[in-house]
Image (cartoon, rainbow, N blue to C red):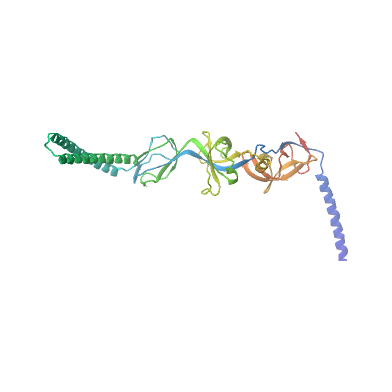
Amino acid sequence: MKNIVYSTAFIFFLISFTHCSSEDTSSAAFSGESVSVTLNKTETNSAGGFAVASGKLVSKNSVNVSTRMMGYITSMPVEVGQSVRAGQQLVSINNSEIQAKGGQANAQIMQAQAAFDSAKKDLNRFKNLFASQSASQKELDDMQSRYDMARASLEAAKQMKNEVSAQYRYTNISAPISGVVTAKFAEQGDLANPGMPLLTIESSATLQAQLMVSEQYITQIKDGMEVDVLIKSIGKESKGKVAEISKSSAHSGGQYMVKVNLPKSDELLPGMYVNAVFPFKSSSSTETEEASNILIPKSALVKNGQMTGVYTVSSQNTAVLRWLKLGKEMGEQVEVLSGLTAGESYVVSADGKLYNGVKLSVK
């Protein structure tokens, strides 16, 4: 009896499943309408490939202001973000000890000057006596030695005065360049130590993009190479030129530092993050194939959870969703590592909803 009940239930389930499946199939069938789309073809750089590197903008002219004197800061009238001009007073340090040394140096100069004047008079006197044979050669030589010693003492006292005057410059510190104060490491009342940074000044007149490049590309980057640089925060591109290439990665985590000069712009500020594209020229077809890259616009991408793809066109002129493996982004474009080949068509935009199998009408 139970077997009869189970058999009847199974037959009922089978009939219901068949009925539902036929309904789904009919609803998914092509209705005869097509979706109007705009297509584009993938392209690679026929002259070679490119490499994308990340980094940030830095000021080419950046200085840390410090002092060679130890003393308490009596004045620091500038703040972070303030523009300063070359020669402008930035920091004053207590100079009471320097003033005392300056007084001592002045006293020593006066003393040495008096001794020198006396020695000079005695030397001239003994020269006259020696000429009239009233003084011996030894006496003249002694006067000459006394004169030379007095002159040396006077010169030493003057040099000490110059040293004190030089120390005065380190108690009143001026801006070495025109720029903007980007960092402040001390405040009024703090004790300044020799060599301790007090301020950082950066000039935005010349900015550089400091980029970290992988070892597989560094040998293809040359001085003066033109580079496309994208400033992420403002979404703008700028043309730059390679100015400096590091030949060692010992202190940069296995990557090489490349510096690219950028033209002056009021929109660019030190610290902004950037991406740069280095174009390469290959000498052989093998190298070109290895270095070639495919870029497509990000607007053409279709996302489903963690997966990203793009609609392509089948031989029956229907839509086929192709999942992609993507690389680095460059502006409004993204690098395709796998999933598309060169010369393959893909959908850029559509006037209706796209899905696998829908008929496409190319604009």
Q: Which residue is rendered at x = 77% and y = 36% of the image?
A: 361
Residue 189, given in percent of the width and then of the height, sits at: 35, 45
Residue 40 found in image quarter: top right
Q: Is residue 16 left or right of residue 303?
A: right
Can residue 107 be seen here? The reply is no
Can residue 23 be seen here? The reply is yes
Residue 83 found in image quarter: top left
Please give the count of numbered marks on the rendered protein.
0
Q: Nearer the viewer, residue 146 or 250?
A: 146
Q: Quadrant of the C terminus?
A: top right
Q: Which residue is rendered at x = 49% and y = 35% of the image?
A: 206
Q: Nearer the viewer, residue 122 or 177?
A: 122
Q: Is residue 200 left or right of residue 98?
A: right
Residue 55, given in percent of the width and then of the height, sits at: 55, 43
Q: Quadrant of the N terminus?
A: bottom right
Q: Is residue 240 left or right of residue 134?
A: right
Q: Nearer the viewer, residue 327 or 147?
A: 147
Q: Is residue 348 left or right of residue 187?
A: right
Q: Residue furthest left?
A: 134
Q: Where 1 sits versus 31, above or below?
A: below
Residue 150 found in image quarter: top left
Q: Nearer the viewer, residue 351 or 298?
A: 298
Residue 106, given in percent of the width and then of the height, sits at: 24, 39
Residue 353, given in percent of the width and then of the height, sits at: 74, 40
